[in-house]
């Protein structure tokens, strides 16, 4: 009898959605950015006054067509630390880490505007922001490079779990010391009740090295 009760309890626990963790990053956790490195880098970036200490308030997970996984740790600094893995979800599978900050979010009011975003706004050969020109990174064979589509599952601290369809394009521009500032343009579509909530989200970011970040235990 007891063994049956325990097995039932375990099965219930396993069925509960759990936010992914990696590098010591987890929902409700926090991390610190290297103040000196960020102070030297920040004058060349679009963002200003990025918080050195950031609290993780939500976690997103999106499988990639390549077999990898996109993990996003959304913070209280209007941004997210993005970790890309390939072939697994351990630190050995990490291929890229970037820190992003939201620049602008625009509501898309109707289907015609949404279709125009998918066709010609999200993916362009170059994208200009504040007079800075970014070049498209994700290319395709031929003249057209359609946005990359993913579905993100987002886990929040209050236990809420939601899904968002995203259509993305990555851009970059060179800065000093062979580094780049990256730009992410995303069309987001989410089912809210009987309606589709759509918006265009623009974020700027930069690469994060292991020495640039400290995970708070």
Image (tube, rainbow, N blue to C red):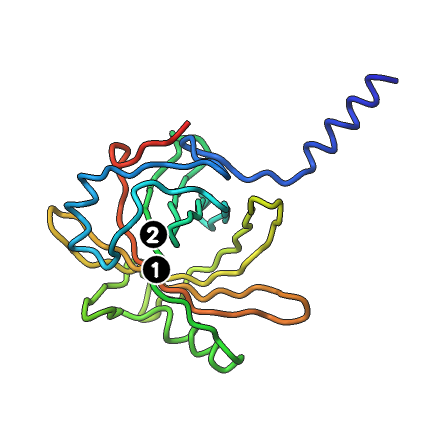
| Crowd band around label 1 with a 10 angstrom C-alpha radius: few (<14), some (14–19), many (20+) | many
Left-right relation of 89 to 209: right
Name the one closer to the observer, 29 or 153.
29
Quadrant the C terminus occupies = top left
Tags 2 and 1 touching, CB below 8 Å: yes
The residue positioned 23% from the left and 64% from the top of the image is 134
Q: Residue furthest left?
A: 177
| Crowd band around label 2 with a 10 angstrom C-alpha radius: few (<14), some (14–19), many (20+) | many
Height in image: 136 above or below 155?
Answer: below
Left-right relation of 197 to 65: right
What percent of the width, then of the height, locates residue 143?
Answer: 31, 71
What percent of the width, then of the height, locates residue 99?
Answer: 32, 47
Helix, strand or loop at mark 2: strand
What percent of the width, then of the height, locates residue 176?
Answer: 11, 50
Give me the C-alpha separation between circle 2 and circle 1. 6 Å
Residue 184 appears in which quarter of the rendering?
bottom left
Height in image: 79 above or below 16?
Answer: below
The residue positioned 24% from the left and 58% from the top of the image is 172
Left-right relation of 8 to 25: right
Helix, strand or loop at mark 1: strand
Q: Which residue is mark 2?
A: 100
Quadrant the N terminus occupies = top right
The residue positioned 45% from the left and 44% from the top of the image is 71
What number is the disc on residue 203? 1
The residue positioned 53% from the left and 66% from the top of the image is 189
């Amino acid at each position: 009898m007891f063994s049956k009760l325990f097995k039932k309890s375990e099965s219930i626990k396993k069925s509960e959605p759990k936010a992914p963790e990696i590098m010591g990053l987890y929902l409700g956790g926090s991390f610190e950015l290297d103040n000196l490195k960020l102070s030297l880098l920040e004058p060349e970036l679009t963002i200003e006054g990025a918080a050195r200490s950031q609290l993780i308030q939500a976690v997103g997970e999106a499988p990639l067509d390549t077999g990898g996984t996109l993990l996003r740790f959304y913070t209280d600094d209007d941004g997210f630390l993005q970790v890309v893995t390939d072939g697994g979800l351990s630190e050995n599978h990490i291929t890229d880490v970037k820190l992003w900050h939201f620049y602008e979010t625009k509501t898309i009011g109707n289907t015609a505007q949404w279709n125009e975003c998918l066709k010609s706004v999200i993916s362009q050969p170059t994208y200009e922001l504040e007079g800075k020109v970014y070049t498209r990174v994700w290319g395709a064979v031929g003249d057209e490079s359609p946005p990359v589509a993913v579905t993100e599952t987002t886990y929040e601290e209050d236990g809420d779990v939601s899904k968002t369809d995203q259509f993305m394009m990555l851009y970059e521009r060179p800065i000093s010391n062979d580094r780049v500032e990256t730009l992410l343009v995303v069309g987001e579509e989410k089912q809210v009740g009987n309606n589709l909530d759509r918006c265009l989200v623009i974020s700027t970011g930069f690469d994060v090295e292991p020495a640039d970040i400290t995970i708070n235990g």
